[in-house]
Amino acid sequence: MGFANRATDAVRLLLDLVTRDPPFVRGGGLDPHAIPVFTFHTLEPRSFERRMRYLRDTGYETLTMRQYLDSISGRAAAPPKSVLLTIDDGRATTWTVGYPILKRLGLRATAFLVTSAVHDSDEVSKTIDDASGTELSALIGRDDTNDRPFVSWGEVRAMRDVFDIESHTHLHARIAVSGTASSAVMTESMQRGYGAFDCPFQWLAPGGPPVRGGAVPLGSRLPESAPRLSGRPAWRAVDQRRETDSEMRAAIAFDLGEARRLIREKAHVEASTVCYPWHVFSPIAKEVAAETGHRGAFAGKSSKGPTISGPGSDPFEIARVGEDYVERLPGTGRKPLLTVFADKARR
Ligand SMILES: [Zn+2]
């Protein structure tokens, strides 16, 4: 990461700290009714294991999704000192790094899968606990390679004793929202893996489906875009019009319904929640999430409403906080805030 990016990151972290983070991050205690939900993406073995050991050694309980939902709906109280761990995107390290560490320590987490990205095979890769040398570094760096940057359905089935399998939508889609090209240009890194999520879906052929990634020619200027669930209508370049409200609803219903259907068919479990891609949602997205059978939906840090969710909070707008703050939870060995920032800047 360049210096400018790191500096922007640090400024954002500081602003959020003052305006949007829950009190425990700033050194306060934990409201017994509010349950912190932590967000992870790519898992780095050393920092992930250190954070998980902190939770275990300080007596935190990592909830199942059912326990969490029962608690925020007021149906059954969660034990004191409970947290929910959520890992987004179904990147390869969810299995290669996350699974062995959580299993060894007896902890639970939730995996939010992008079902169109899950590798359609029974293949179960080695994990960091049964590899060494170059094999080990390949497993740790897998999220950033073209080889297989996401988990396979075989791995998803194998991780169910540790993970609740939940939805991060089928497509993790961005959509073109105007005919105006933005400064973005289609690059190789946007043709596959996580990079493809940043390439907006576009209608390139009359009557054809919207496409992205490898289907968009390299070097093309990309249209202005927004997350599919943002509530902004997609711009259909071929017919030179915006999609209608009912077309938008149908597209979102497909994206949410298809993920649940595939999780049922391939992993043999029922997904009861969805995590909004880029943490962006709209009233329509919330309504469609309820209509497609979800019991709740996860966002990011809340800009309004509570910064941490608990009983009585809106279950379709559950607030989450970044993984950097796991060691800010009250307990022996709590990490000073400055050390958290210093670690973040070093990465
Ligand atoms: Zn995501």
Image (tube, rainbow, N blue to C red):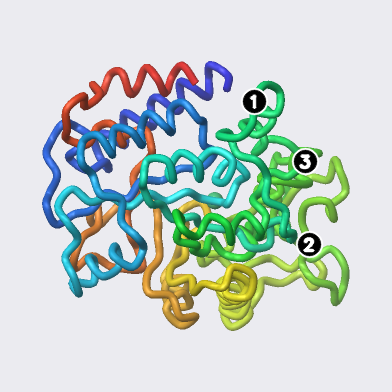
Q: Give the label on residue 233, or none.
A: none
Residue 268 in which image quadrant: bottom right
Q: Residues within 10 Å of mark 3 (few under 14, many from 20)?
A: few
Residue 325 or residue 196, whichever sits in front: 325
Q: CA distance from mark 3 to mark 2?
A: 22 Å
Identify the amino acid type marked 2.
Val
- At horizontal 63% and vertical 72% (from top left) the residue drawn is 262
**Which element type, helix, strand or loop, lies under badge 2?**
loop
- At horizontal 24% and vertical 34% (from top left) the residue drawn is 57
- Residue named by callout 1: 132
Identify the amino acid type marked 1.
Ser
Camera-side mark, 1 or 3: 1
Residue 145 or residue 317, whichever sits in front: 145
Q: Residues within 10 Å of mark 2 (few under 14, many from 20)?
A: some
**Which element type, helix, strand or loop, lies under badge 3?**
loop
**Which element type, helix, strand or loop, lies under badge 1?**
loop
Classify residue 93 as left or right of residue 55.
right
Q: Give the label on residue 147, or none.
A: 3
Classify residue 154 as left or right of residue 335.
right
Residue 236 in which image quadrant: bottom right
